[in-house]
């Protein structure tokens, strides 16, 4: 427990909150042809997807994701498999869920989910992307690049930053993830992986400050 909870400072929390708010797209969840639950370490994605299904927002739900270094121990059979099981336990019918168990990155989450839907004869015009809160912007930018002919709406659990930190239980990991996701928002358009997103000056300053403070374990290396 002690190595998990080396407390972040108030300044670091303020800067992280700026980045957290930027990552969220602040879209209004609304009815869509399908939803895609983006695999990650956060089982809240499956719970939120189930809640939206029960609210009648979509008839078909894809869970996508294999494993990553942060999920292999938690979800040994793969992110999508565990998300599917959790959603079924929360009342989503088995036949409403498509499984995409191979994606290893956000681009593959999008393209392999699109392929799984097409194989099922589903060609949506509107897609609701359900992700962990700080993955909304990266998911949006990636989907707009790789699937430009559909309307993309992003949603995640409506949690305040402090409550999300408590729910994950590892402040450093969350800040590392926030910083790593923002690096990808900035760098992926240059690599052709996503559309460009403007990053406000204060958000960029917060990002650089947290890098200097050592929240770097999820940064890409060149």
Image (cartoon, grey):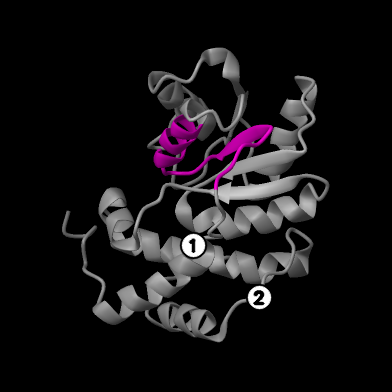
Q: Which residue is mark 2?
A: 198
Q: Earlier in the sequence, mark 1 or mark 2?
A: 2
Q: Taking 147 as reference, is 35 above or below it? A: above
Residue 151, horizontal then vertical, whole percent: 74, 47
Structural crowding at the residue carrying mark 2, measured as other residues with C-alpha within 10 Å and reported as few (<14), some (14–19) or many (≥20)? few
Q: Which residues are magenta?
A: 29-52
| Residue pictured at 21% horizontal, 69% vertical | 7
Q: Is residue 176 toward the left or the right of residue 185 in the image?
A: left
Most distant residue in the left direction: 2
The kind of secondary structure element at disc 1 is: loop
Residue 200, picture quadrant: bottom right
Residue 108, horizontal then vertical, whole percent: 69, 43
The foreground one among 38 and 28 is 28
The foreground one among 181 and 124 is 124
Residue 222, picture quadrant: bottom right
Q: Which mark is residue 79?
A: none
Q: Is residue 4 toward the left or the right of residue 14 in the image?
A: left
Residue 212, picture quadrant: bottom left
| Residue pictured at 79% horizontal, 26% vertical | 118
């Amino acid at each position: 427990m002690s190595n998990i909870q080396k407390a972040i400072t108030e300044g670091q929390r303020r800067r992280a909150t700026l980045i957290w708010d930027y990552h969220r797209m602040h879209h209004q969840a609304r009815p869509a042809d399908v939803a895609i639950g983006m695999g990650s370490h956060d089982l809240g994605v499956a719970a939120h997807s189930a809640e939206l299904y029960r609210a009648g927002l979509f008839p078909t739900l894809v869970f996508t994701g294999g494993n990553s270094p942060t999920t292999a121990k938690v979800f040994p059979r793969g992110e999508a498999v565990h998300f599917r099981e959790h959603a079924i336990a929360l009342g989503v019918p088995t036949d409403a869920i498509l499984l995409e168990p191979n994606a290893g990155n956000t681009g593959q989450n999008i393209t392999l989910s699109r392929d799984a839907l097409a194989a099922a004869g589903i060609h949506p015009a509107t897609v609701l992307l359900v992700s962990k809160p700080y993955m909304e912007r990266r998911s949006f930018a990636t989907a707009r690049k790789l699937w430009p002919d559909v309307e993309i709406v992003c949603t995640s659990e409506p949690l305040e930053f402090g409550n999300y930190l408590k729910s994950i239980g590892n402040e450093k990991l969350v800040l590392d993830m926030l910083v790593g996701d923002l690096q990808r928002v900035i760098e992926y358009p240059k690599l052709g992986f996503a559309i460009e997103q403007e990053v406000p000056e204060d958000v960029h300053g917060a990002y650089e400050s947290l890098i200097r403070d050592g929240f770097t374990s999820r940064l890409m290396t060149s």
